[in-house]
Image: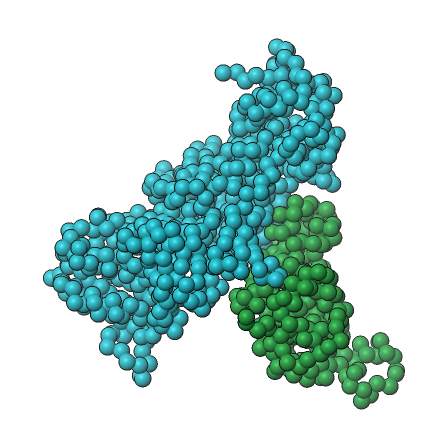
Amino acid sequence: MEPIVKTLSKKDFLSFVDRLINEGKQSVIGVKAKGTHFVFGPLETAKDLRLDYDVTILPPKKYFFPQYEKLMEYNLEKPFEVTQNTEESAPIIIGVHPYDIIALKQTDTYYLDPQIDTLYKKRRNDAVIIGADIQKVSSRSFAASMNTHVTEDGFDLLLTDIGDKIAVTIGSKKGEQLLEKYATAEKITGKETEKIKKIRSSLPSKYKQAVKLSKEQWSSALVANYNHSLWEENSDKCMECSSCTMVCPTCFCYDVRDEVSLDMKDGKRIRTWDGCMLRDFTKVGSGEVFREEVKERYRHRFFRKGNYLPERYGFVACVGCGRCGIACLPDIADPCNLINDVAHFGTEKDTNRFFIKQKTEAMEKGVFHVPRSATIKHAEKRSEMDTLFEIELDDQKPLGHNPGQFVEVSVFGYGEAPFGVSSPPSDTPTFEIMVRKIGNVTTKLNSMKIGDKIGIRGPLGTGFDVKDFEGKNLLFTSGGTGMVPMRSLINYVVDKKNRSKYKNIIILYGAKNPKEMLFLDDVEQWKKVENIQCELTVDRCEPNECWGGCTGLITTLFPKIKADKLDSKNTVAIIIGPPIMYKFVIKCLQTMSIPDSNIWVSLERRMKCGIGKCGHCQINGVYCCKEGPVFNYEKIKLLPEAFE
Amino acid sequence: MKTKPRVAVFDFADCEGCELEIADLEEEILELIDIVDIVSFREVMKEHSDTYDIAIVEGSIMRPMDEARLRNIRSKAKILVAMGACATMGGINKIRNQWMPDDVMTAVYGDADLEGNPLFDVFKTKAINEVVPVNYYIHGCPIDRDEFKHVITSIALGKKPEIPRYPVCVECKKNENICQFELGAFCLGPITRAGCKAICPTHNSVCEGCRGLIKKAETDCVKDLLERYKLSYEDIRRRCTMYNFGREECGVDE
């Protein structure tokens, strides 16, 4: 259906904007000059509106996903009092170019599927987008070759300067009503319609830059060149300033942190823009950085745009605005140049190999930033650094987790951290987590007492499919704190109700030293279970320490497995441990001829939001917090970032 | 109720601008004394006590007598916080380290007879951590009041303050500034630690690196940047003199 288009004289258009500013309920944002550049900012008068701009420094994402945003407020004097941020100010935004409109549609897909970001959604629903056809092409833009220089939807109204008049294309009921209320628009003439068409069709010739590949080809060109030397050559010049991601309309990764008022009576949880080019982006509590090299981060940014998000959602997460090209001092950030460079080096058919197709469900209905209130029921020091907590959800509902799933634990004022659940699924509202003193949240948790309140989000992620393991031998290998989530699974299968569903069980467990061995009381119980073999080892043992198990790395336990207990084809192996452990253990399993599809791993990454939005836990195209942390090795082994 | 930590503020060679930033908290000072007892703070009060848990130290160390005083402070404090560029890295006071102390004294005081006067017995400027261990840093010249509050509340809560390790550009971009390089200026933002909310470029002035460099000037990317903007190593060395003298090759320190 052809859209309705009306026209306003330039004078009437200005008075339309002035009436929006003076009479409307919503604040009015428009494109204004800032020195030799342009920005979206509050309009005081229609005269300041510059529809002849080329590109703004920041995209309009700042109105939907602000640089600093209060997610919630909490009261530190009360045991648990938290209020979600509802104060909203969704404006009318005038002059949004088509590429930015398309970028907002992409952000919608990301933030509204499957988990709805309620704050974002409210702003999107309330805001009015008054788009504008491009009059002046930015020197670095390549939007025409991305087909994002024009758009047919995604706006409430769209303005086209047709010389003596402004043509207004109506894109929504909301836009139509606004136009009716604040202006008297005329019907468009046939001649004027032709003018609009001509303006749009002549636009591509004004672009100096063009991507040589079609959007569909980005993915294959990138995948073919995953190991190309150009990542390193370019990233050698990178300042690691993440300016490219800050100015990008399709970069929407974020960090969350807690701020506390000076009198420490209350505080707020803040969401800020984060950038995958920054080193600490992938840093976890233990200090591990998963994309340590600049080259890896640099490559990640392009793969996210050209391969990971396209495989997941079907769109290239670049709209050709050219902002990163302008912002990047060494000029290595421009996807147009990068894609044109890799275009020479061949293409790859198997484009989805860095992505695991898997349907995941939204975790809880409604808000997902605000945690549920819970109470510490029991706290027991298990080693110098570890405390086992029993936690009860105050709504008295069971957590409802599968073994392998995790929860985000909030201590207001300190932040939020992910913990694997260490107790088996249960009908009661309690569950257990083991807390090792590493960062701010864990240190605080360790000092908390019975009756203290904490916040819980979850269960999160994909756990083990215990049904799938039925009728099989089970070989558990855990190292260090990997035993924490493993215990949830082991206790489930050794439970009297379930034991008969599984065949022989072998448990291999290693820790740095006897002091760091966790759940030895559980181990004693497991040893009593029928057809079970338990083998323990420590890397090191001081002469004065009491230790009855082996010494050596976890791999030294494999020769101890009683061969008659394991029919390799009918054995499922489960591995949870520190990142370094996996490849060695997997080698042992392969030597035992256990097929890769029978191997399950649980991986650690920086799980911050837990719902596949903030971007920190990505392993190539996979969100560890959503598709994982439990993965089938056969699938995850194709991801180069999984076991680096 | 838990007893409040006792805080003492001390200054060495500096302009006291960072202390002024604390004084400028105005009514928020009342919130501050809600969570800590300020037992010594020469700039704003006359009382003084030698019993404190947290020492906030401003200024650089210039003389043996400063060193002795600082060691004494360190021995009394459980936690020592270096506040402001003079304390965290020597800052402006290190400009004179490019000359020998005797030559500096002669240039400033001519042939005045200062022999034996301990006030004028100077050595090369030192940052606080060149004399005693430092627990926390509040960077900047002057410090950012919000960061001061963050560090103080973090210490009071027993958590590690979150101080950015990324460059000023991150905050500058969030503020939607026009890049100083684009305006033809030479800004140290790309190699300077953020946390200042990019206050200088936001007010159309270049970053002078007062929060410390996070990249060595010899790094390939810095060399490439200099070349691209027709600058030399000498240019960057000269620009670093203001706050980062002798630190061009230090990189991020924590």
- The front one of A265 and B82 is A265
> Can I make out residue A425 in this image?
no
Quarter of the image holding residue A326? top right
**In this image, A281 relative to A478: left or right?**
right
- The front one of A381 and B98 is A381
- Structure colour scheme: by chain
**Residue at 49% across, 64% down:** A440
Q: Colour of chain B?
A: green
**Residue at 28% across, 61% down:** A487
> Can I make out residue B103 in this image?
yes
Residue A383: image x %, image y %?
Answer: 36, 72
Q: Residue farthest to the top?
A: A190
Q: Colour of chain A?
A: cyan
For residue A404, above or below residue B106:
above
**In this image, A476 relative to A408: left or right?**
left
For residue B66, above or below residue A533:
below
Residue B99: image x %, image y %?
Answer: 76, 75
**Residue at 54% across, 46% down:** A85
Q: Residue farthest to the left?
A: A564
Quarter of the picture containing the C terminus of chain A is: bottom left
- The front one of B185 and A355 is A355
Q: Residue farthest to the bottom?
A: B116
